[in-house]
Structure formats: C-alpha cells, structure tokens
Image: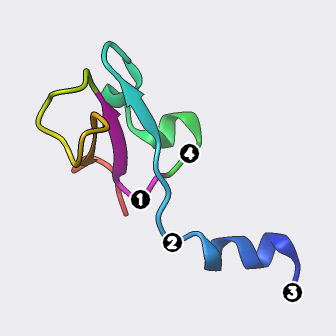
C-alpha cells in the first residue's frame, strides 16, 4: 500500500490552529482546499475557559461538512 493510499486511513481527525483575530475561522475550510473534519483548535490567552491550562480548546464547526 502506498503512502497516498495509507494516509487517509491513519488520519481520521485533523485539526487547525486558530488564533485570536484570525479571519480564516469565518470561512469554510473547503475554500482553502483543506478539510479538517469540522474541528479546529482555538487558541486564546491563558486563563480562559479551556481544556487544561494551555489556553487551547476544541471548537466544533457546524458549517463544515464532515
């Protein structure tokens, strides 16, 4: 099996880092030719309500086709 055939099997979920002020989250990932299964990692200042103390949290994108 080639890498190109194997890659979609191994990568079931992919993520994109989004930072405060980033305009990209307002546009579907399809526009940029990148599907990330409706999930992105949103970064904000430490201390915000997030998963852990890293300042990162998972955000579901409802406008992206999974």
Q: Residue furthest left?
A: 49
As measured in the structure, the alpha-carbon distance from the residue carrying label 4 to the one carrying label 1 is 9 Å
Q: Quadrant of the C terminus?
A: bottom left
Marked residue nearer the N-terminal end (2 or 1):
2
As measured in the structure, the alpha-carbon distance from the residue carrying label 2 to the one carrying label 1 is 8 Å
Q: For the image shown, how many numbered marks are present on the structure?
A: 4
Q: Residue furthest bottom?
A: 1
Above or below for 10 versus 29: below
Instruction: Say which of marks 2 and 1 sits in front.
Output: 2
Find numbered disc 3 in the image and state the secondary structure of the residue it sits on: loop
Assess whether residue 38 is covered by the magenta stretch.
yes
**Residue at image point 59% right, 42% down:** 33
Residue segment shown in magenta: 36-43
Can you identify the residue that label 1 sits on?
A: 37
Q: Residue furthest front?
A: 53
Can you identify the residue that label 4 sits on?
A: 34
**Residue at image point 86% right, 87% down:** 1
- Closer to the camera, 28 or 6? 6
As measured in the structure, the alpha-carbon distance from the residue carrying label 2 to the one carrying label 3 is 18 Å
Marked residue nearer the N-terminal end (1 or 3):
3
Can you identify the residue that label 2 sits on?
A: 12
Can you identify the residue that label 3 sits on?
A: 1
- Closer to the camera, 51 or 20? 51
Marked residue nearer the N-terminal end (2 or 3):
3
Q: Are marks 2 and 1 in contact (CB under 8 Å)?
A: yes
């Amino acid at each position: 099996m080639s890498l190109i055939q194997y890659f979609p099997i191994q990568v079931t979920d992919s993520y994109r880092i989004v930072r405060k002020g980033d305009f990209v989250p307002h546009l579907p990932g399809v526009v940029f030719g990148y599907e990330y299964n409706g999930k992105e990692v949103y970064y904000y200042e430490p201390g915000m309500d997030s998963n852990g103390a890293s300042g990162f949290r998972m955000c579901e994108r409802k406008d992206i086709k999974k």
